[in-house]
Amino acid sequence: MCGIVGVVGDDFKVFDVVDSLKRLEYRGYDSAGVAYIKDGKVLIFKSVGRIDVLRGSLGEHLKDEISVGIAHTRWATHGSPNDTNAHPHTDCTGKIAIVHNGIIENFRELKAFLEGLGHEFRSDTDTEVIAHLIEEEYKGDIFEAVLNAVRKLDGAYAIGVVHSDHPDTIIAARKGSPLVIGVGNGFSLIASDITPMLRYTKDFIFLEDGDIALLNDKGVKVFRMDGKPVDRRIQRIDLSESAAEKGGYKHFMMKEIMEGPQTLVSAMTGRIKDGYVKIPELEELDLSKITRINVVACGTSYHAAMFFKYFVEQHTDVDVSVEVASEFRYRKPHIDDKTLTLAISQSGETADTLESVRLAKRLGSNIIAITNVVGSTITRESDISIMMNSGPEIGVAATKTYVAQLTILALLGLQLIRERGFWSGRHKRILDNLIRMPEIFENVLSLSDSIRALAEKYSRYEHFMYIGRGYGFITAMEGALKLKEISYIHAEAYPAGELKHGPIALLDEKFPVFAISPSDSLYLKMKSNIIECKARDAKIISVGTSGNGELFDISNDVLFVPRVADELYPLVMAPVIQTFAYHMADIKGYDPDKPRNLAKSVTVE
Ligand code: AGP
């Protein structure tokens, strides 16, 4: 998730813009840059690495007095992290500079069109296309030029644009990526969130999708895509900078759980065309020839991998094996050049997963990585990398990256189903559910307060048993891991059918059961398992499908999620198990963002 800041007003120095950018460092980034107008020219300084590297390259320019400036921290999605791909980007004339957060889905087509008109590109980014598009549209009015340019964009963007002919103006626009305007006395600001602006003002305008704003020495005006002005109210927000970094939440983990809807959008953007899944990164791969897939992963990524196995085996003739990477790497696996290896790692640096990739490669297997970090080791050692585009996940516990992994694996499964000739109306319904998932998530995220109350009720228990069947078992495994890793409460996960083979001996009134029991094809079996557990005096917390009132008869507490396709309950239930674990940890006084003994990326054995 990139970071944008911009200033319009007479009392700023370049130092102020760069210093504001530092307030967005928490978002994570791999390069940074700044553009400002001086003596009728656009000056751009940008470099890969930390903001301090950028500050060093600016040197005395930090003291330059400016009336307009924009700056950016880049979290790479298209194009590796390097100086050329860093923002701001410019056009052929060097008179325009732009910073961008988002993904332009149709940038390849636009780039070809503009190259046909003679435009020359310097970077591999989608963003640079916007600069040349504005150049093409510019006839003297920078607002009109940006408006006409963004109307041609598909995908998500938050942009800030400056032009050397208009040294007191920033044009800002957003669709699908956040952008906020800070309103001051004699100045105005733009930023990806309010954090970098709080030092200057507490008055903000939150742009909405399809807004485009003109900031200049006369103030701020907001318009819609049809060019008509719109009245956006100014909101006073009095937050500390550290509170703002967390979006007003107490911890990054809760902020990142709440980012679920945006995470879903970012994971799907550019991968669904004309009612079918088309993952651009797989263009060179003929999925119709794939009959065997070996998946390697660890922890939460392993649970996502299990979802993929259940999904693909249920709907195709492809055989999927899933291995915990730390075991796989020491085995003598029977894979060859006819086996596709899928390596799932949000960090892209997990040692066990990397060693498993190397082993699979030595055995002749083609490697696809699913990861969240452009330029990570796994991307450099895999044949194909599918990016999760979730933006940096600050909390050590995987939350939004698990949501992104499930989403991409569902898309990959659906593309495999179609290319192996198994596509049917049922798969269309699954895809429709997936497309609607961001709004369904809003419904589930609203459960947070009732989940808090539930956590308070169960916070004194020292053991939990998570059970589920089929896709429900995947949610049970992830729920138990989340609870363990941030609240330090002992939690086991078992296939519900396995309880009678031993684990049920553990159950009594001190050992609550978290029963993942959606109204899917295995519900009646789950119902019997819940009754078995209740008969041992265990307290039952059931997570079911809205409308299934009988869960109240067999449970002590019930949480409901909206009805979705059976295959998508792990996705729709993810916020429930994540939020429960979060509140349990918070109630016990622990810091969910930094759990003891854990690292965000396990780069050692
Ligand atoms: C999940 O909450 C944990 N932080 C951990 O299990 C993690 O999923 C595992 O270490 C794998 O990390 P990766 O996805 O970066 O490879």
Image (cartoon, helix red, strand yellow):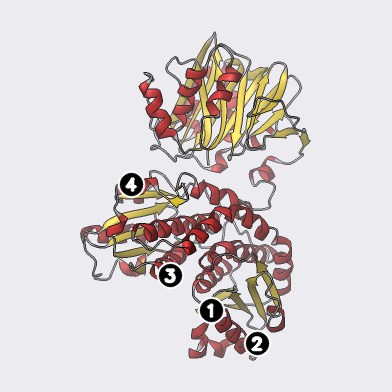
Quick check: marks 2 and 4 in contact, CB under 8 Å? no
- For image coordinates 31% across by 68% down, the residue present is 328
CA distance separating discs 1 and 3: 14 Å
Residues 339 and 105: in front is 105
**Cα distance, mark 2 to mark 4?**
51 Å
Residue plotted at (56% across, 30% down): 159
Write down the residue under mark 3. 310
Amino acid type at circle 1 is: Leu
- Image position, residue 284 (x, y; %): 29, 47
Please tell me the numbered disc located at residue 534. Answer: 2
Q: Residues within 10 Å of mark 2 (few under 14, many from 20)?
A: many
- Secondary structure state at the residue bearing disc 1: loop
Question: How crowded is the residue under tag 3: few (<14 C-alpha within 10 Å), some, or many (20+)?
Answer: some
Residue at 47% in and 31% down: 127
The secondary element bearing badge 3 is classed as helix
Q: Is residue 604 visible?
A: no
Residue 198 shows up from this direction:
yes
Q: In whole angstroms, how far apart are the C-alphas of marks 4 and 3? A: 25 Å
User: What is the distance, in whole Å, between disc 2 and disc 3 at their CAs?
Assistant: 28 Å
Lower sequence index among marks 1 and 3? 3
Q: Residues within 10 Å of mark 4 (few under 14, many from 20)?
A: few
The percent coordinates of residue 486 (x first, y second) are 58, 64
> Could you tell me if the residues under marks 4 and 3 are in contact, i.e. CB atoms within 8 Å?
no
